[in-house]
Image (tube, rainbow, N blue to C red):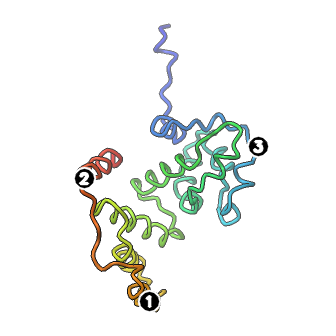
Amino acid sequence: MSHSDHHIERNSLAAKVEKEVEVKAQKCYQCGKCSAGCPVAEDMDFPPSMVLRMLQTELPANDEKILKSHSIWLCVTCEMCLSRCPMEIDIPSMMDFLRQKSRSEGKENPKAKNIIAFHKSFLKSIKNTGRLYELGLILDYKRQSLNMTQDMALGPKMLSRGKLHIFPEKIKDRAHIAKIFKKTSK
């Protein structure tokens, strides 16, 4: 039996996380410090330690639950979990990958509709101008989320105080931003 006969190709979500963002879920020994420190764990359907445990099983049913979970959209990437993890597992990078994977496979959790609308608007602003254009972000988010009247009274006040700008500022090297988006949208 050759060496290649012993090699079994892993096709699990954990294997994809490991390959794409170099985060090894198998390193987690379930101490729970990530979930204990997470500021939004109570609102998640699966706290970070549970997401890691589900990845460790490498079961397709668990992979599906993760991609359809609300948890991956609630993560605010504050890095509290990473700072508390004794194994230095980069959970925020893992959550970013899981969000992108969820979107690319059309498995977004319906409860995350507004979060996803904000996510799309934010990325669109960065892609178009190279930096955050707040007024454009707000208008695009309102259009996507259909929350047209939410915080409506704040807009004129912020414009009058110079907190929002009518026109976006664009960075000079937007081609570089386009390369980043092209590279990460694989």
Residue 68 position (above or below residue 7) = below
Q: Quadrant of residue 75?
A: bottom right
Q: From the viewer's perspective, is 28 left or right of 140? A: right
Query: How many angstroms separate mark 1 from mark 2 (CA)?
Result: 32 Å
Sequence-wise first label, 1 or 3: 3
Residue under numbered circle 3: 31
In front of the other: 154 or 76:
154
**124 sits to left or right of 63:** left
Query: Which residue corresponds to the image point at 51% horizontal and 36% vertical from the top-left?
Result: 22
Which of the two labelled residues, at mark 2 and mark 3, occupies the earlier sequence position? 3
Please state which amino acid type lies under the numbered disc 2: Asp
Of labels 2 and 3, the one closer to you:
2
Question: In the picture, residue 58 is in which quadrant?
Answer: top right
Quadrant into which the C terminus falls: top left
Q: Disc 1 marks which amino acid?
A: Lys
Q: Which mark is residue 173?
A: 2
Q: Secondary structure at mark 3?
A: loop
Q: Nearer the viewer, mark 1 or mark 3?
A: 1
Q: Residue at x 27, y 64 (%)?
A: 170
> What's under tag 3, amino acid-wise?
Cys
Other-residue count near label 3 (Cα within 10 Å), few / some / many at <14 / 14–19 / ≥20: few
In-image side of 23 versus 164 (left or right): right
How far apart are the alpha carbons under marks 1 and 3? 48 Å
Which residue is more in the foreground, 90 or 102? 90
Can you tell which mark lies on residue 157?
A: 1
| Residue 67 position within the rendered picture, expressed as x and y whole percent measured from the top left | 52, 54
